[in-house]
Image (tube, rainbow, N blue to C red):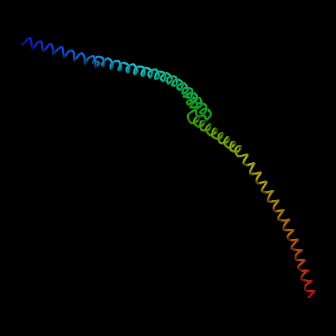
Amino acid sequence: MDELISAVMIGHKSKLDKEFEIRRADQPTETDELRRKLARIIREKDDDCEFFNAKIRQLKRQLKDATGEKAELEEAVQKLEAQKTRMEKFYKNKMGLDQPTDTEKSKTGTLITDMGVLQRRLEFLEEQAEERNKQMIQEHAPCRREIQRLQQELVEERDLRSNLINKKNKEIAYFKNELDGLLTDIASTSTDSV
């Protein structure tokens, strides 16, 4: 009986093995699916790697450009600061605001140097006021000439109108006298005829 059981089991096992092999042949195996998934993941990883490498290259170019631009801007800032320093020094010298050295203070005294500084500043401010006045006169000169021209035209127009009015008044007075003379003649003829 054991033999019969073992024979049935072997027959059953071989039958199960055949069914399993048939199923295995019809369906892809798990390893094939895993291989496909792995290949897909590797392709995606490669695509991502290429994308990020391109992005890194782009960012490196932008960084290089920004660094160059930063250097240019720093150079421009240095030039502008140097120009600002020169201009400040020029205006301070022009206005007399440059500070005397310690040896100059000891020689002349602080009160005298302060007075000199104030005097230079006053002179500078007076020069600026004169320049502004000259500039304003030059700016308003065309307007003043136009005003004078218009005033001249106005005076001429008034004279012309007053002459015209006087002439018309004289004509009116003449016609009035003529009319009065005619009316008196008519009145005297009508009284004579009556």
* Residue 83 place in picture, x, y as percent: 58, 28
Q: In which quadrant of the rendered image does the C terminus lie?
A: bottom right
Task: Return the residue found at the far bottom.
Answer: 194
* Residue 186 place in picture, x, y as percent: 90, 81
Q: Is residue 128 left or right of residue 54?
A: right
Vertical placement of 167 versus 138: above or below?
below
Which one is nearer the viewer's eye here, 104 or 19? 19
Residue at 63%, 38% in the rendered image: 124
Vertical placement of 139 versus 177: above or below?
above
Which one is nearer the viewer's eye here, 150 or 69? 69
* Residue 15 place in picture, x, y as percent: 18, 16
Residue at 24%, 15% in the rendered image: 21
Find residue 178 and report its image quarter. bottom right
Q: Is residue 25 left or right of residue 49?
A: left
Vertical placement of 88 versus 29: above or below?
below
Q: Is residue 22 left or right of residue 133?
A: left
Task: Return the residue found at the far top.
Answer: 3
Q: How many marks?
A: 0
Find residue 189 and report its image quarter. bottom right
Vertical placement of 110 versus 184: above or below?
above
* Residue 91 place in picture, x, y as percent: 60, 33
Residue at 16%, 15% in the rendered image: 13
Q: In which quadrant of the rendered image does the N terminus lie?
A: top left
Task: Return the residue found at the far left.
Answer: 1
Which one is nearer the viewer's eye here, 94 or 46? 46
